[in-house]
Amino acid sequence: MTSQCHTSQLHCRHSILSGHSTKWLKLLWMLFLGFSPGSWAQQGTQPHSIKIEGDITLGGLFPVHSRGPAGVPCGEIKREKGIHRMEAMLYALDQINSDPDLLPNITLGARILDTCSRDTYALEQSLTFVQALIQKDNSDVRCSNGEPPIIAKPERVVGVIGASGSSVSIMVANVLRLFSVPQISYASTAPELSDNSRYEFFSRVVPPDSYQAQAMVDIVKAMGWNYVSTLASEGNYGESGVDAFLQISREAGGLCIAQSIKIPREPKPGEFDKIIKRMMETSNARGVIIFANEDDIKRVLEAAKKANLTGHFLFVGSDSWGAKSSPILDQEDVAEGAVTILPKRASIDGFDQYFSSRSLENNRRNIWFAEFWEDDFKCKLTRPGIKYDTGKRKCTGEERISRDSQYEQEGKVQFVIDAVYAMAHALHSMHIDLCPGYMGVCEKMDPVEGRMLLQYIRSVSFNGSAGTGVMFNENGDAPGRYDIFQYQLSNTTNPGYRVIGQWTNHLRLNAEEMQWSGGDRQIPDSVCSFPCEPGERKKMVKGVPCCWHCELCDGYQYQLDELNCDSCPFDMRPLKNRTGCRQTPIIKLEWSSPWAIIPVFLAILGILATSGVIITFIRFNDTPIVRASGRELSYVLLTGIFLIYLITFLMIAEPGVAVCAFRRLLLGLGMCISYSAMLTKTNRIYRIFEQGKKSVTPPQFISPTSQLIITFILISVQVLGVFIWFAVDPPHTNIDYEEQRPPNPEFARGVLKCDMSDLSLICCLLYSIVLMVTCTVYAIKSRGVPETFNEAKPIGFTMYTTCIIWLAFVPIFFGTAQSTEKMFIQTTTLTVSMSLSATVSLGMLYIPKAYVIIFHPEQNVQKRKRSFKAVAQAATVSTQLSQKSNDKPNGSKIEPDRSQ
């Protein structure tokens, strides 16, 4: 009967759990995904686990297997992340149990479970740890024979080492918290687990991802990147790690996220190809921050290689990548240059010796060791009832780890050992306080009270397996200490991970130690926009502070700062690189300029010719030709012509107060003198012949003195106007920066000039032009006067030609007002026009006389002097001839009467 009840023990236990559990277990099932108790029972009385007997039992959670495909909880074995870490716990237990100073006469045991890298499966497995804490009422439970069941007392787990993944730890921590079971993780780094109000029984010997995220932000900034994408495995570890990175990067500023992509927990076929294609939408974001599990990392690298993007993406991996070889196996070329982070660690020599000595014979306590052996040595063990696979080499059992297979200590081994030792030190301190002098576990520690043990855990402080301090803050977090690695492949005798820096609250990165794809030492770019060239401003892209377009500061603008251009002051122009302004060069009309050579040449010839005529007239002052030409007015007129030529030199000379004053005075004075004299002459002739038609009485004011007075009165108007101008606006110079300011500032010049506008210049000449026009009118009226009597016709021709010259001057002068060569063209046009008008006057009126005086002196003789009466008769005859000419048919010609 008893045997029968023993046989039905499983059935009874199932009945207890499914029908008569306490409210706590029911609450667990309600809270966590509605697990069916049948799924637990289907695996037997205990989940597949390792059992180590001891006085005090610790729980262990390790990802011995990877996540299986849909519908299958577990996949292939994980040699490094699973077996290495799990063996590290067994190694630590052996060390503690053999240490006479730590927990003397107390043996630590263990119950170690496989999480299969899946949080839901790990939760189901971890219910084993709380069986002994569930109070069950078995009074109404009977076996089939009616007797009460014999139920073995379940082992009591006082604390749990694990889990690995943050999502697994979070799920398990919610269960263990309900039963006050302390938990120390060796690898879970999600910032969420720092919340002491939700996970008060959770501690960890690795720093949280908030420290890791800060370190990764510092790394990205140290490499000069400002535009990156993020990849996160769905779950607490990946999502909270990326969230911490995003938050810290926002607070730090200067870092933009191109895309933040989540890898589904159960990715569909082609999912990783889509992820790579999506990341290429922002191809400038070559840097990829990846918080993902080992399997997802491997698939991302495979997809990048498949897309022929080897060397494009630059990965910055979290501690889940660390310095592991499994994620990059067969993908080394894609992973080249990847920068990874790992909590500061050291290789534990004792563990290497321990693990390399493990064999099938001496490690039977590890129920998964045979599976590891087959995977590690690529062979097959023969098992009863299992057909031998002829395609694989048969294991001999003589293989040795490290000798016959590749071996490198997994990165978290140190932390597994530290977690076990932290639990042991807490139990040791608790034993000293509760069981002083007692050998073994006293009543006060049987059972161990979880909340009290938690206080001892949070108070531990000792040097860990790597010699670094192990301690916890009020949230159960370890201090942040990280090693920075880079996977280097090219130009190195030993390809693999190389330490390139450290982070302990601040970053120390050896950039010269870094090496990228193809052995390049230059850090690649991962920026949205490259820095603008000098002289270009940033036009920001709305909503993306790291992206901008570069716009050249054009025209006369310079780069004020990164974002703005500003115009240079009116007297300055931008530097060639437009980073500032420089003084605009000052120019003036130089004597050597072609614009000056021609006017100067004409002026010199004119001055020489005028001087020659004046000297000739002075030398032959009393000769008939000189006297007949009206000596007084001739000298006045020649003086005006001389001044007209002279003004050319003042117009070209470097502007100054004196030069500007003489320009104002002489610019119009020379022409005024010339045309005043000619106007007086033509007016005298006109009045004489008009008067002669009416009477023989001569008109008034025709004497030389009267003529001079009239001329000087006309000249005084010009002089008076100039002096009024001096009083109102004293002469001075200025620099005109607008005149030569073309679109290209390189050709900008400031023109040094007298303060005379185009309008003031025309006003200065206007009086002379009025005199010239008036003189021309009189010349036209006097055109019928016989040429043997006066200079009316030469003066007329002079005025006609002069008018033509000045009519051509006006469009040239004002038509070039917008030209960059305005000053040169206008000055040359003005001086040449004045020189030509002076030359016409000199050539028409005086050169013939000088020629006769010098070369034909025989013609320079006294002719019969004519009285005013003779002049009057000549005027009458001229009028009659003109009338007859008008009455005669076309083609007839009337000869003038020269008998007088």
Image: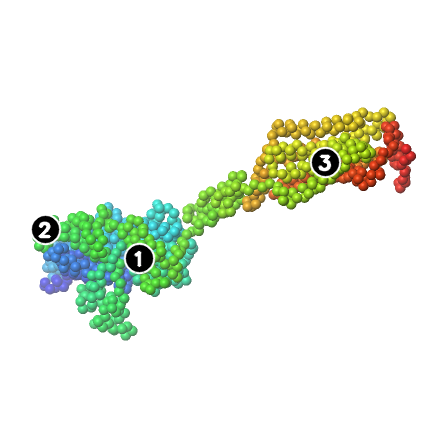
Is 862 left or right of 651, judged from the image as shown?
right
Choose the circle earlier in sequence order: 3 or 1. Answer: 1
Which amino acid type is shown beneath numbered disc 3? Answer: Ile
C-alpha distance separating marks 3 and 1? 94 Å
* Quarter of the image where one finds residue 518: bottom left
Question: In the rendered image, which quarter contains the N terminus?
Answer: bottom left
Of helix, strand and loop, which one carries label 1? strand
Which amino acid type is shown beneath numbered disc 2? Answer: Cys
Place of residue 244 in the rendered image (x, y in percent of width and height, measured from the top left): 32, 49
Q: Which of marks 2 and 3 is in front?
A: 3
Is 180 left or right of 639, judged from the image as shown?
left
Residue 831 visible at all? yes
C-alpha distance separating marks 2 and 3? 132 Å
Near mark 3 (Cα within 10 A), the count class, few <14, some 14-19 or many ≥20, is many
Location of mark 2 (residue): 435
Location of mark 3 (residue): 641
Q: Residue at x 11, y 58 (%)?
A: 148
Near mark 1 (Cα within 10 A), the count class, few <14, some 14-19 or many ≥20, is some
Location of mark 1 (residue): 499
Residue 301 visible at all? no
Choose the circle earlier in sequence order: 2 or 3. Answer: 2
Of helix, strand and loop, which one carries label 3? helix
